[in-house]
Amino acid sequence: MGQLTAPNLRAAVLADASSLAAVSLEVWFATYIHHGINAPFADFALAHFTPKLFRNWIGDPDHHLIVSQNRDGIDGFIHIDENSADPVNGTVSTEIASLYVQPRHQGRGLGGALLQAVLDRAGGQVWLAVNSENTKARAFYGAHDFTKLGESGFKIGDESYPNDILTRAPLR
């Protein structure tokens, strides 16, 4: 796909909640489900990617969601929590809770534009958790000067999945 020249980025509004939930489900299942959907994964996704949860985040002053919108609707977003402690050393800073771009829109610069919007806003240290086996995401963040701070586990049902905790200090 070609490089994006001018993404249409804006703050999320309450009316975006259902679209954000749908994009989340699409990206999450496309990223993590490879051999069929089992009940623990389905239950997790359906409980965590809801319009109600997105409305709550949009109304919370510690959370900020920036969306990328094309002529038809939202094709990606980034969600940050400005007061979140990283699980490695407990330092409170800005967490990138999620950065999701619809698979058919990946590779056009939307993720980089959304990430840069957050980095410009945060101004300081940021951190995130990424599945240790998600090589595409780890390469993306590495290309944007994130380094590994440590590891944590992410539980779904009775299983725990390894996550890398990545951080980026402000560029000087």
Image (spheres, rainbow, N blue to C red):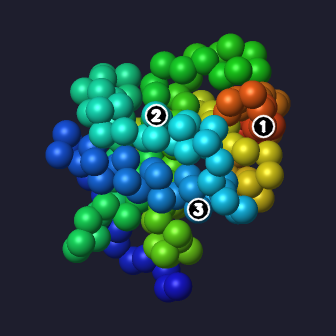
Residue extending furthest front? 39
Corner quadrant of residue 72:
bottom left
Q: Which residue shows up at 61% across the image and 42% down it?
A: 39
Residue at 69% x, 43% y is 130
Q: Earlier in the sequence, mark 2 or mark 3?
A: 3
Residue for badge 1: 161
**x, y percentage for residue 93?**
56, 23
- Rendered position, 63 above or below 144: above
Give the farthest residue toward the bottom.
2
Q: Which residue is mark 2?
A: 47
Residue 157 falls in image quadrant: top right
Q: Secondary structure at mark 1?
A: strand
SS at mark 3?
helix
Nearest the eye: 24 or 159: 159
- Residue closer to the observer: 21 or 35: 35
- Whether residue 171 is visible: no
The reply to whether callout 3 and callout 1 are in contact (CB within 8 Å) is: no
Name the N-terminal-most of marks 3 and 1.
3
* Foreground disc of the pair 2, 1: 2
Residue 81, percent from left and from top: 46, 28
Which residue shows up at 28% across the image and 70% down it? 70
Q: Earlier in the sequence, mark 2 or mark 1?
A: 2
